[in-house]
Protein backbone atom coordinates (compact mmCIF):
# COMPACT_ATOMS: atom_id res chain seq x y z
CA UNK A 1 0.00 0.00 0.00
CA UNK A 2 1.40 3.42 -0.88
CA UNK A 3 1.73 6.21 1.66
CA UNK A 4 -1.00 8.09 -0.20
CA UNK A 5 -3.52 5.31 0.30
CA UNK A 6 -2.47 4.87 3.94
CA UNK A 7 -3.21 8.54 4.47
CA UNK A 8 -6.55 8.33 2.65
CA UNK A 9 -7.56 5.42 4.89
CA UNK A 10 -6.53 7.33 7.98
CA UNK A 11 -8.60 10.25 6.78
CA UNK A 12 -11.64 8.05 6.12
CA UNK A 13 -11.39 6.65 9.66
CA UNK A 14 -10.93 9.96 11.42
CA UNK A 15 -12.81 12.51 9.32
CA UNK A 16 -15.77 12.81 11.68
CA UNK A 17 -13.88 13.01 14.92
CA UNK A 18 -13.66 16.30 16.82
CA UNK A 19 -10.33 18.07 17.21
CA UNK A 20 -11.40 18.93 20.75
CA UNK A 21 -11.56 15.19 21.52
CA UNK A 22 -7.90 14.90 20.55
CA UNK A 23 -7.07 17.48 23.22
CA UNK A 24 -9.17 15.59 25.78
CA UNK A 25 -7.28 12.39 24.98
CA UNK A 26 -3.79 13.95 25.08
CA UNK A 27 -3.14 16.59 27.73
CA UNK A 28 0.20 17.26 26.09
CA UNK A 29 -1.21 17.75 22.61
CA UNK A 30 -0.38 21.46 22.33
CA UNK A 31 3.31 20.65 22.88
CA UNK A 32 3.32 17.40 20.94
CA UNK A 33 1.82 19.00 17.87
CA UNK A 34 4.00 22.10 17.71
CA UNK A 35 7.36 22.60 16.04
CA UNK A 36 9.79 25.40 16.63
CA UNK A 37 13.11 27.05 16.24
CA UNK A 38 14.67 28.83 19.21
CA UNK A 39 12.44 31.88 18.65
CA UNK A 40 9.45 30.77 16.60
CA UNK A 41 6.65 28.31 17.19
CA UNK A 42 4.30 26.61 14.75
CA UNK A 43 1.26 25.19 16.52
CA UNK A 44 -0.64 22.68 14.40
CA UNK A 45 -2.47 21.04 17.29
CA UNK A 46 -5.77 22.60 16.18
CA UNK A 47 -5.94 20.23 13.21
CA UNK A 48 -7.23 16.69 12.92
CA UNK A 49 -3.67 15.33 12.66
CA UNK A 50 -2.79 12.68 15.25
CA UNK A 51 0.36 10.64 15.89
CA UNK A 52 -0.55 8.02 13.25
CA UNK A 53 -1.35 10.64 10.63
CA UNK A 54 1.85 12.50 11.34
CA UNK A 55 3.89 9.31 11.11
CA UNK A 56 2.25 8.52 7.75
CA UNK A 57 2.90 12.06 6.50
CA UNK A 58 6.56 11.81 7.52
CA UNK A 59 6.78 8.44 5.77
CA UNK A 60 5.35 10.08 2.64
CA UNK A 61 8.08 12.72 2.79
CA UNK A 62 10.78 10.07 3.22
CA UNK A 63 9.42 8.04 0.30
CA UNK A 64 9.58 11.19 -1.88
CA UNK A 65 13.35 11.39 -1.43
CA UNK A 66 12.96 14.77 0.19
CA UNK A 67 16.40 14.64 1.78
CA UNK A 68 18.03 13.82 -1.55
CA UNK A 69 16.20 16.65 -3.31
CA UNK A 70 16.93 19.10 -0.51
CA UNK A 71 20.64 18.30 -0.63
CA UNK A 72 20.59 18.54 -4.43
CA UNK A 73 19.04 22.03 -4.20
CA UNK A 74 21.52 23.37 -1.66
CA UNK A 75 24.47 21.86 -3.54
CA UNK A 76 23.64 23.62 -6.81
CA UNK A 77 22.39 20.63 -8.85
CA UNK A 78 20.14 21.67 -11.79
CA UNK A 79 16.87 20.64 -10.10
CA UNK A 80 14.89 23.10 -12.26
CA UNK A 81 14.98 20.44 -14.95
CA UNK A 82 12.73 22.02 -17.57
CA UNK A 83 15.09 24.98 -17.79
CA UNK A 84 18.27 23.09 -16.76
CA UNK A 85 19.02 25.52 -13.97
CA UNK A 86 20.26 25.26 -10.42
CA UNK A 87 17.98 26.67 -7.69
CA UNK A 88 20.16 28.69 -5.38
CA UNK A 89 18.30 31.59 -3.81
CA UNK A 90 19.73 30.12 -0.60
CA UNK A 91 23.22 31.14 -1.80
CA UNK A 92 22.13 34.81 -1.62
CA UNK A 93 21.86 34.50 2.17
CA UNK A 94 24.70 32.01 2.67
CA UNK A 95 26.73 34.75 4.33
CA UNK A 96 29.37 32.56 5.93
CA UNK A 97 28.35 29.10 4.84
CA UNK A 98 31.26 28.25 2.57
CA UNK A 99 31.43 27.53 -1.16
CA UNK A 100 28.43 26.71 -3.34
CA UNK A 101 29.38 25.13 -6.64
CA UNK A 102 27.52 25.52 -9.94
CA UNK A 103 29.11 23.73 -12.91
CA UNK A 104 32.38 23.45 -10.99
CA UNK A 105 32.58 27.14 -10.02
CA UNK A 106 32.03 28.59 -6.55
CA UNK A 107 29.28 31.23 -6.87
CA UNK A 108 29.82 32.72 -3.41
CA UNK A 109 32.58 35.23 -4.27
CA UNK A 110 30.27 36.77 -6.90
CA UNK A 111 27.27 36.81 -4.54
CA UNK A 112 29.26 38.52 -1.78
CA UNK A 113 30.84 41.02 -4.19
CA UNK A 114 27.38 42.04 -5.48
CA UNK A 115 26.10 42.35 -1.93
CA UNK A 116 29.03 44.63 -1.13
CA UNK A 117 28.28 46.77 -4.23
CA UNK A 118 24.64 47.00 -3.16
CA UNK A 119 25.74 48.06 0.32
CA UNK A 120 28.04 50.78 -1.01
CA UNK A 121 25.38 52.08 -3.41
CA UNK A 122 22.63 51.99 -0.76
CA UNK A 123 24.85 54.01 1.59
CA UNK A 124 25.57 56.48 -1.21
CA UNK A 125 21.86 56.95 -1.98
CA UNK A 126 20.95 57.24 1.71
CA UNK A 127 23.58 59.96 2.15
CA UNK A 128 22.49 61.84 -0.99
CA UNK A 129 19.65 64.29 -1.70
CA UNK A 130 17.42 61.49 -2.97
CA UNK A 131 14.13 61.62 -1.07
CA UNK A 132 12.17 58.94 -2.92
CA UNK A 133 12.93 55.63 -4.60
CA UNK A 134 10.54 54.09 -7.13
CA UNK A 135 10.96 50.36 -7.75
CA UNK A 136 9.47 49.48 -11.14
CA UNK A 137 8.99 45.74 -11.47
CA UNK A 138 6.26 43.10 -11.50
CA UNK A 139 5.74 39.60 -10.10
CA UNK A 140 8.87 38.49 -8.28
CA UNK A 141 10.53 41.82 -9.06
CA UNK A 142 7.83 43.63 -7.08
CA UNK A 143 5.98 41.45 -4.58
CA UNK A 144 8.98 40.49 -2.43
CA UNK A 145 10.49 43.94 -1.89
CA UNK A 146 7.04 45.59 -1.65
CA UNK A 147 5.85 43.09 0.97
CA UNK A 148 9.12 43.30 2.93
CA UNK A 149 9.27 47.10 2.77
CA UNK A 150 5.84 47.30 4.35
CA UNK A 151 6.65 44.58 6.87
CA UNK A 152 9.74 46.45 8.06
CA UNK A 153 8.42 50.01 7.98
CA UNK A 154 9.48 50.63 11.63
CA UNK A 155 13.07 50.16 10.44
CA UNK A 156 12.89 52.69 7.59
CA UNK A 157 15.45 55.42 8.06
CA UNK A 158 16.29 56.11 4.41
CA UNK A 159 14.40 57.62 1.48
CA UNK A 160 10.73 56.73 1.02
CA UNK A 161 10.14 53.74 -1.28
CA UNK A 162 7.31 53.29 -3.77
CA UNK A 163 6.43 50.32 -5.92
CA UNK A 164 4.97 50.50 -9.42
CA UNK A 165 4.02 47.23 -11.09
CA UNK A 166 0.82 47.42 -13.13
CA UNK A 167 0.98 48.37 -16.81
CA UNK A 168 -2.24 50.30 -16.13
CA UNK A 169 -1.02 53.88 -16.46
CA UNK A 170 -2.94 54.69 -13.29
CA UNK A 171 -0.24 53.01 -11.22
CA UNK A 172 2.72 55.06 -12.42
CA UNK A 173 0.69 58.26 -12.86
CA UNK A 174 -0.56 58.19 -9.26
CA UNK A 175 2.93 57.42 -7.93
CA UNK A 176 4.86 60.01 -9.93
CA UNK A 177 2.27 62.70 -9.17
CA UNK A 178 3.55 62.71 -5.58
CA UNK A 179 7.25 63.00 -6.42
CA UNK A 180 9.93 65.52 -7.33
CA UNK A 181 11.86 64.28 -10.38
CA UNK A 182 15.03 66.01 -9.18
CA UNK A 183 15.19 63.97 -5.96
CA UNK A 184 13.82 60.64 -7.15
CA UNK A 185 15.75 57.47 -7.93
CA UNK A 186 14.09 54.97 -10.27
CA UNK A 187 15.11 51.34 -9.93
CA UNK A 188 14.10 49.15 -12.85
CA UNK A 189 13.80 45.63 -11.47
CA UNK A 190 13.43 42.86 -14.02
CA UNK A 191 15.24 39.55 -14.12
CA UNK A 192 14.82 39.31 -17.90
CA UNK A 193 14.61 43.05 -18.65
CA UNK A 194 12.02 42.24 -21.31
CA UNK A 195 8.80 42.17 -19.27
CA UNK A 196 6.44 44.43 -21.17
CA UNK A 197 4.77 45.99 -18.12
CA UNK A 198 8.08 46.90 -16.52
CA UNK A 199 9.70 48.22 -19.69
CA UNK A 200 6.63 50.32 -20.50
CA UNK A 201 6.60 51.81 -16.99
CA UNK A 202 10.38 52.37 -17.11
CA UNK A 203 10.13 54.34 -20.37
CA UNK A 204 7.27 56.42 -18.96
CA UNK A 205 9.31 57.16 -15.81
CA UNK A 206 12.32 58.13 -17.92
CA UNK A 207 10.28 60.59 -19.99
CA UNK A 208 8.74 62.04 -16.81
CA UNK A 209 12.15 62.51 -15.26
CA UNK A 210 13.51 64.26 -18.35
CA UNK A 211 10.44 66.50 -18.58
CA UNK A 212 10.57 67.48 -14.93
CA UNK A 213 14.22 68.45 -14.51
CA UNK A 214 15.66 65.15 -13.32
CA UNK A 215 18.57 63.31 -14.93
CA UNK A 216 17.84 59.75 -16.06
CA UNK A 217 21.54 59.26 -16.81
CA UNK A 218 22.31 59.35 -13.09
CA UNK A 219 18.94 58.72 -11.42
CA UNK A 220 18.19 55.28 -12.86
CA UNK A 221 19.50 51.95 -11.59
CA UNK A 222 18.77 48.42 -12.83
CA UNK A 223 18.48 44.98 -11.25
CA UNK A 224 18.66 42.19 -13.79
CA UNK A 225 20.32 39.06 -15.10
CA UNK A 226 20.42 40.67 -18.58
CA UNK A 227 23.17 43.27 -18.30
CA UNK A 228 23.36 43.81 -22.08
CA UNK A 229 19.72 44.93 -22.09
CA UNK A 230 20.23 47.31 -19.17
CA UNK A 231 23.04 48.93 -21.19
CA UNK A 232 20.74 49.26 -24.21
CA UNK A 233 18.26 51.07 -21.98
CA UNK A 234 21.02 53.53 -21.10
CA UNK A 235 21.74 52.60 -17.51
CA UNK A 236 25.39 52.94 -16.54
CA UNK A 237 27.01 49.64 -15.53
CA UNK A 238 28.01 51.23 -12.21
CA UNK A 239 24.33 51.22 -11.23
CA UNK A 240 23.45 47.80 -12.60
CA UNK A 241 23.23 44.98 -10.06
CA UNK A 242 23.27 41.61 -11.73
CA UNK A 243 22.29 38.14 -10.64
CA UNK A 244 22.31 34.71 -12.20
CA UNK A 245 19.56 32.58 -13.70
CA UNK A 246 19.73 30.24 -10.70
CA UNK A 247 17.70 32.82 -8.74
CA UNK A 248 14.01 32.40 -9.58
CA UNK A 249 11.98 35.62 -9.80
CA UNK A 250 9.70 34.77 -6.89
CA UNK A 251 12.74 33.80 -4.78
CA UNK A 252 14.79 36.89 -5.59
CA UNK A 253 14.16 39.36 -2.75
CA UNK A 254 17.39 38.27 -1.05
CA UNK A 255 19.67 39.67 -3.73
CA UNK A 256 19.70 42.73 -6.01
CA UNK A 257 15.89 42.69 -6.30
CA UNK A 258 15.95 43.66 -2.59
CA UNK A 259 17.90 46.88 -3.29
CA UNK A 260 14.94 49.21 -2.66
CA UNK A 261 14.41 47.48 0.68
CA UNK A 262 18.09 47.83 1.54
CA UNK A 263 18.00 51.55 0.72
CA UNK A 264 14.93 52.01 2.91
CA UNK A 265 16.06 50.07 6.00
CA UNK A 266 19.83 50.30 5.59
CA UNK A 267 22.44 47.60 4.91
CA UNK A 268 22.66 46.50 8.57
CA UNK A 269 18.97 45.71 8.84
CA UNK A 270 19.06 44.07 5.39
CA UNK A 271 21.92 41.93 6.65
CA UNK A 272 19.79 40.85 9.62
CA UNK A 273 17.02 39.93 7.15
CA UNK A 274 19.49 37.71 5.25
CA UNK A 275 20.65 36.20 8.55
CA UNK A 276 17.06 35.24 9.33
CA UNK A 277 16.75 33.47 5.98
CA UNK A 278 20.07 31.72 6.55
CA UNK A 279 18.98 30.60 10.04
CA UNK A 280 15.86 29.00 8.54
CA UNK A 281 18.01 27.27 5.89
CA UNK A 282 20.19 25.77 8.63
CA UNK A 283 17.09 24.69 10.55
CA UNK A 284 15.55 23.16 7.41
CA UNK A 285 18.73 21.22 6.64
CA UNK A 286 19.35 19.88 10.14
CA UNK A 287 16.15 19.67 12.22
CA UNK A 288 14.84 16.13 12.36
CA UNK A 289 11.38 14.99 11.24
CA UNK A 290 8.60 16.53 13.29
CA UNK A 291 11.00 19.17 14.66
CA UNK A 292 11.41 20.64 11.20
CA UNK A 293 9.22 23.72 10.72
CA UNK A 294 9.08 23.92 6.89
CA UNK A 295 8.57 20.16 6.70
CA UNK A 296 5.69 20.21 9.16
CA UNK A 297 4.05 23.25 7.59
CA UNK A 298 4.23 21.46 4.24
CA UNK A 299 2.84 18.20 5.63
CA UNK A 300 -0.07 20.02 7.25
CA UNK A 301 -0.68 21.59 3.82
CA UNK A 302 -0.57 18.20 2.06
CA UNK A 303 -2.93 16.74 4.65
CA UNK A 304 -5.50 19.48 4.20
CA UNK A 305 -5.26 19.89 0.45
CA UNK A 306 -4.43 16.51 -1.07
CA UNK A 307 -5.85 14.18 1.60
CA UNK A 308 -8.81 16.06 3.09
CA UNK A 309 -9.60 17.77 -0.23
CA UNK A 310 -9.78 21.37 1.02
CA UNK A 311 -9.06 23.33 -2.14
CA UNK A 312 -7.91 26.61 -0.61
CA UNK A 313 -5.89 27.84 2.33
CA UNK A 314 -6.26 31.22 3.99
CA UNK A 315 -3.19 33.10 5.22
CA UNK A 316 -4.27 35.40 8.02
CA UNK A 317 -1.52 37.58 9.47
CA UNK A 318 -2.56 39.35 12.66
CA UNK A 319 0.14 41.80 11.80
CA UNK A 320 -0.93 44.80 9.73
CA UNK A 321 2.53 45.16 8.26
CA UNK A 322 2.25 41.65 6.78
CA UNK A 323 -0.79 42.83 4.83
CA UNK A 324 0.93 42.00 1.54
CA UNK A 325 2.05 38.54 2.66
CA UNK A 326 -1.01 36.81 1.13
CA UNK A 327 -0.30 38.42 -2.28
CA UNK A 328 3.39 37.51 -1.97
CA UNK A 329 2.50 33.91 -1.09
CA UNK A 330 0.04 33.72 -3.95
CA UNK A 331 2.94 34.06 -6.36
CA UNK A 332 5.35 31.98 -4.29
CA UNK A 333 2.95 29.07 -3.81
CA UNK A 334 0.67 29.20 -6.83
CA UNK A 335 3.31 29.94 -9.47
CA UNK A 336 5.57 27.30 -7.93
CA UNK A 337 3.13 24.45 -7.37
CA UNK A 338 0.11 25.31 -9.54
CA UNK A 339 0.96 22.71 -12.18
CA UNK A 340 -0.73 19.59 -13.49
CA UNK A 341 2.35 18.01 -15.06
CA UNK A 342 4.91 16.23 -12.94
CA UNK A 343 8.68 16.19 -13.38
CA UNK A 344 8.51 13.00 -15.43
CA UNK A 345 6.00 14.54 -17.87
CA UNK A 346 3.02 12.58 -16.55
CA UNK A 347 -0.20 14.20 -15.40
CA UNK A 348 -0.54 14.48 -11.64
CA UNK A 349 -3.02 11.88 -10.36
CA UNK A 350 -4.04 14.24 -7.55
CA UNK A 351 -4.72 17.90 -7.01
CA UNK A 352 -1.58 20.00 -6.75
CA UNK A 353 -1.03 23.46 -5.25
CA UNK A 354 -4.02 24.93 -3.42
CA UNK A 355 -5.56 28.34 -3.96
CA UNK A 356 -3.90 30.69 -1.48
CA UNK A 357 -5.69 33.79 -0.30
CA UNK A 358 -6.15 35.94 2.76
CA UNK A 359 -5.86 39.35 4.34
CA UNK A 360 -4.59 40.90 7.53
CA UNK A 361 -6.57 40.36 10.72
CA UNK A 362 -8.60 41.85 12.22
CA UNK A 363 -9.94 43.36 8.97
CA UNK A 364 -10.77 39.99 7.46
CA UNK A 365 -12.98 39.21 10.45
CA UNK A 366 -15.35 41.95 9.35
CA UNK A 367 -15.42 40.74 5.76
CA UNK A 368 -15.00 37.07 4.87
CA UNK A 369 -14.76 35.20 8.19
CA UNK A 370 -18.51 34.58 8.06
CA UNK A 371 -17.85 32.00 5.34
CA UNK A 372 -14.85 30.56 7.19
CA UNK A 373 -16.98 29.95 10.29
CA UNK A 374 -20.34 28.96 8.85
CA UNK A 375 -19.88 28.40 5.11
CA UNK A 376 -20.29 24.97 3.57
CA UNK A 377 -16.63 24.69 2.59
CA UNK A 378 -13.83 24.02 5.06
CA UNK A 379 -10.97 26.49 4.73
CA UNK A 380 -7.81 25.63 6.65
CA UNK A 381 -6.52 28.85 8.16
CA UNK A 382 -2.93 29.85 8.80
CA UNK A 383 -2.65 32.51 11.49
CA UNK A 384 0.52 34.53 12.08
CA UNK A 385 1.00 36.72 15.11
CA UNK A 386 3.81 38.48 17.00
CA UNK A 387 4.12 38.41 20.79
CA UNK A 388 4.98 42.09 20.71
CA UNK A 389 4.27 45.06 18.46
CA UNK A 390 6.48 48.01 17.58
CA UNK A 391 4.38 50.63 19.37
CA UNK A 392 4.93 50.26 23.14
CA UNK A 393 2.62 53.20 23.72
CA UNK A 394 -0.11 51.22 21.94
CA UNK A 395 0.49 47.89 23.69
CA UNK A 396 -3.23 47.71 24.49
CA UNK A 397 -3.92 47.63 20.72
CA UNK A 398 -1.54 44.73 20.36
CA UNK A 399 -3.13 42.79 23.21
CA UNK A 400 -6.52 43.23 21.55
CA UNK A 401 -5.07 42.08 18.24
CA UNK A 402 -3.58 38.94 19.79
CA UNK A 403 -6.79 38.18 21.69
CA UNK A 404 -8.68 38.33 18.40
CA UNK A 405 -6.22 36.02 16.68
CA UNK A 406 -6.41 33.42 19.46
CA UNK A 407 -10.19 33.77 19.66
CA UNK A 408 -10.60 33.01 15.97
CA UNK A 409 -8.62 29.76 15.97
CA UNK A 410 -10.42 28.71 19.16
CA UNK A 411 -13.85 29.53 17.70
CA UNK A 412 -13.04 27.67 14.49
CA UNK A 413 -12.09 24.58 16.48
CA UNK A 414 -14.77 24.63 19.17
CA UNK A 415 -17.75 25.93 17.26
CA UNK A 416 -21.07 26.30 19.03
CA UNK A 417 -23.56 23.43 19.28
CA UNK A 418 -27.34 23.56 18.95
CA UNK A 419 -27.98 23.54 22.69
CA UNK A 420 -25.77 26.58 23.22
CA UNK A 421 -27.43 28.26 20.23
CA UNK A 422 -30.88 27.54 21.72
CA UNK A 423 -29.85 29.10 25.02
CA UNK A 424 -28.77 32.24 23.18
CA UNK A 425 -31.97 32.36 21.13
CA UNK A 426 -34.05 31.87 24.30
CA UNK A 427 -32.20 34.72 26.00
CA UNK A 428 -33.36 36.95 23.14
CA UNK A 429 -36.98 36.05 23.96
CA UNK A 430 -37.63 33.58 21.11
CA UNK A 431 -39.92 30.63 21.76
CA UNK A 432 -41.21 27.49 20.11
CA UNK A 433 -40.64 27.03 16.37
CA UNK A 434 -39.18 30.52 16.06
CA UNK A 435 -36.62 29.66 18.77
CA UNK A 436 -35.58 26.59 16.76
CA UNK A 437 -35.28 28.63 13.55
CA UNK A 438 -33.28 31.37 15.24
CA UNK A 439 -31.05 28.84 17.00
CA UNK A 440 -30.17 27.10 13.73
CA UNK A 441 -28.59 30.34 12.45
CA UNK A 442 -26.47 30.64 15.56
CA UNK A 443 -24.83 27.21 15.32
CA UNK A 444 -21.13 27.09 14.42
CA UNK A 445 -20.06 23.66 13.16
CA UNK A 446 -16.54 24.09 14.52
CA UNK A 447 -13.91 21.40 13.95
CA UNK A 448 -12.31 23.70 11.39
CA UNK A 449 -8.53 23.35 11.26
CA UNK A 450 -5.96 26.07 11.69
CA UNK A 451 -2.27 26.55 12.41
CA UNK A 452 -0.70 29.44 14.29
CA UNK A 453 2.82 30.72 13.70
CA UNK A 454 3.89 32.85 16.64
CA UNK A 455 7.12 34.86 16.81
CA UNK A 456 8.55 37.50 19.17
CA UNK A 457 8.37 40.60 16.97
CA UNK A 458 8.36 41.34 13.24
CA UNK A 459 11.98 42.48 12.99
CA UNK A 460 14.25 41.97 9.94
CA UNK A 461 15.68 38.68 11.22
CA UNK A 462 12.22 37.25 11.92
CA UNK A 463 10.85 38.36 8.55
CA UNK A 464 13.80 36.58 6.90
CA UNK A 465 12.90 33.43 8.80
CA UNK A 466 9.23 33.65 7.86
CA UNK A 467 9.90 34.09 4.13
CA UNK A 468 12.46 31.28 4.04
CA UNK A 469 10.03 29.09 6.01
CA UNK A 470 7.40 29.52 3.28
CA UNK A 471 9.94 29.05 0.48
CA UNK A 472 10.98 25.70 1.92
CA UNK A 473 7.38 24.74 2.59
CA UNK A 474 6.65 25.22 -1.12
CA UNK A 475 9.75 23.18 -1.98
CA UNK A 476 8.69 20.28 0.27
CA UNK A 477 5.14 20.24 -1.10
CA UNK A 478 6.53 20.35 -4.65
CA UNK A 479 8.87 17.41 -4.01
CA UNK A 480 6.08 15.34 -2.46
CA UNK A 481 3.80 16.11 -5.42
CA UNK A 482 6.58 15.35 -7.90
CA UNK A 483 6.46 18.89 -9.31
CA UNK A 484 9.24 21.18 -10.50
CA UNK A 485 8.44 24.22 -8.32
CA UNK A 486 10.88 26.48 -10.16
CA UNK A 487 9.54 26.95 -13.67
CA UNK A 488 6.37 28.82 -14.71
CA UNK A 489 5.28 27.72 -18.17
CA UNK A 490 1.69 28.55 -17.32
CA UNK A 491 2.30 32.30 -17.66
CA UNK A 492 3.55 32.06 -21.26
CA UNK A 493 0.41 31.58 -23.33
CA UNK A 494 -1.33 34.72 -22.10
CA UNK A 495 1.82 36.76 -22.75
CA UNK A 496 2.06 35.44 -26.31
CA UNK A 497 -1.58 36.18 -27.07
CA UNK A 498 -1.29 39.67 -25.57
CA UNK A 499 1.54 40.37 -27.99
CA UNK A 500 -0.49 39.23 -30.99
CA UNK A 501 -3.62 41.06 -29.80
CA UNK A 502 -1.83 44.35 -29.25
CA UNK A 503 -2.01 45.55 -32.90
CA UNK A 504 -5.65 44.50 -33.08
CA UNK A 505 -6.48 46.51 -29.95
CA UNK A 506 -4.44 49.42 -31.34
CA UNK A 507 -6.56 49.28 -34.51
CA UNK A 508 -3.49 48.71 -36.68
CA UNK A 509 -4.67 45.25 -37.66
CA UNK A 510 -8.15 44.04 -38.47
CA UNK A 511 -9.71 41.56 -36.09
CA UNK A 512 -9.50 38.45 -38.26
CA UNK A 513 -11.33 35.16 -38.36
CA UNK A 514 -8.51 33.79 -36.23
CA UNK A 515 -10.13 35.67 -33.37
CA UNK A 516 -12.79 33.76 -31.48
CA UNK A 517 -16.21 35.44 -31.70
CA UNK A 518 -16.19 36.56 -28.06
CA UNK A 519 -12.80 38.28 -28.35
CA UNK A 520 -13.77 39.82 -31.71
CA UNK A 521 -16.96 41.25 -30.19
CA UNK A 522 -15.06 42.70 -27.22
CA UNK A 523 -12.53 44.33 -29.57
CA UNK A 524 -15.39 45.80 -31.60
CA UNK A 525 -16.93 47.23 -28.43
CA UNK A 526 -13.56 48.77 -27.47
CA UNK A 527 -13.15 50.42 -30.83
CA UNK A 528 -16.68 51.77 -30.73
CA UNK A 529 -16.38 53.20 -27.22
CA UNK A 530 -13.03 54.90 -26.99
CA UNK A 531 -12.08 58.39 -27.98
O1 LIG B 1 11.67 39.99 -13.34
P1 LIG B 1 11.00 39.84 -14.66
O2 LIG B 1 11.87 39.14 -15.66
O3 LIG B 1 10.52 41.17 -15.18
O4 LIG B 1 9.74 38.93 -14.46
C1 LIG B 1 8.65 39.32 -13.69
C2 LIG B 1 7.66 38.19 -13.52
O5 LIG B 1 7.06 37.89 -14.76
C3 LIG B 1 6.87 36.59 -15.24
O6 LIG B 1 5.71 36.55 -16.02
C4 LIG B 1 6.88 35.46 -14.25
O7 LIG B 1 5.64 34.81 -14.18
C5 LIG B 1 7.28 35.85 -12.85
O8 LIG B 1 7.86 34.72 -12.24
C6 LIG B 1 8.25 36.97 -12.83
O9 LIG B 1 8.60 37.27 -11.49
Image (cartoon, helix red, strand yellow):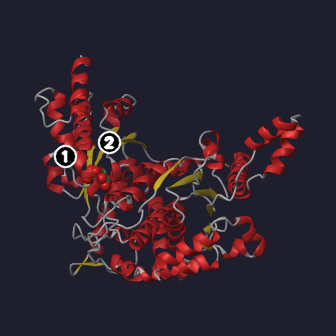
- In space, the residues marked 2 and 1 are separated at their CA atoms by 32 Å
* Location of mark 2 (residue): 185
Callout 2 secondary element: strand
Position of residue 46 measured from the top left corner of the image (x, y, whole percent):
67, 64
In front: label 2 or label 1: 1
Mark 2 residue's CB less than 8 Å from ligand 1:
no
Q: Nearer the viewer, residue 281 or 135?
A: 281
Q: Residue at x 72, y 71 (%)?
A: 22
Which mark identifies residue 71? none
Q: Residues within 10 Å of mark 2 (few under 14, many from 20)?
A: many
Callout 1 secondary element: helix
Q: Residue at x 29, y 69 (%)?
A: 346
Q: Nearer the viewer, residue 496 or 374?
A: 374
How many marks the image carries: the answer is 2
Q: Residues within 10 Å of mark 1 (few under 14, many from 20)?
A: few
The image quadrant of residue 169 is top left
Side of 73 relative to 154 (left or right):
left
Q: Which circle's residue, 2 or 1, is located before the other in the chain? A: 2
Side of 488 relative to 254 (left or right):
left
* Location of mark 1 (residue): 496
The image quadrant of residue 37 is bottom right
Mark 1 residue's CB less than 8 Å from ligand 1:
no
Position of residue 264 measured from the top left corner of the image (x, y, whole percent):
44, 49
Q: Nearer the viewer, residue 452 or 477?
A: 477
Side of 327 relative to 12 (left or right):
left
Amino acid sequence: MTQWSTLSELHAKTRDRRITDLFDADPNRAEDFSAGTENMRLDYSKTNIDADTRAALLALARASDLVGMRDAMFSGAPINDTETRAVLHTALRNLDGGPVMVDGTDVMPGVLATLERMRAYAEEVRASTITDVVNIGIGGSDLGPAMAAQALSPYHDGPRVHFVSNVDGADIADTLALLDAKTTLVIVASKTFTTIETMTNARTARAWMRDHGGDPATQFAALSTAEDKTADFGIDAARVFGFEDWVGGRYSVWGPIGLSLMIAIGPRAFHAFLRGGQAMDTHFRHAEGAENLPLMLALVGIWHNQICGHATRAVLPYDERLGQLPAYLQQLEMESNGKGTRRDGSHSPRDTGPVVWGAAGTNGQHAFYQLIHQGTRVIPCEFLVAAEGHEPELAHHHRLLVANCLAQSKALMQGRDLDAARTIAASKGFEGAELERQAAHRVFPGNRPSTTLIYPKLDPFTLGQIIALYEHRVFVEGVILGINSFDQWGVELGKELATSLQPVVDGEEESTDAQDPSTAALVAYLHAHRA
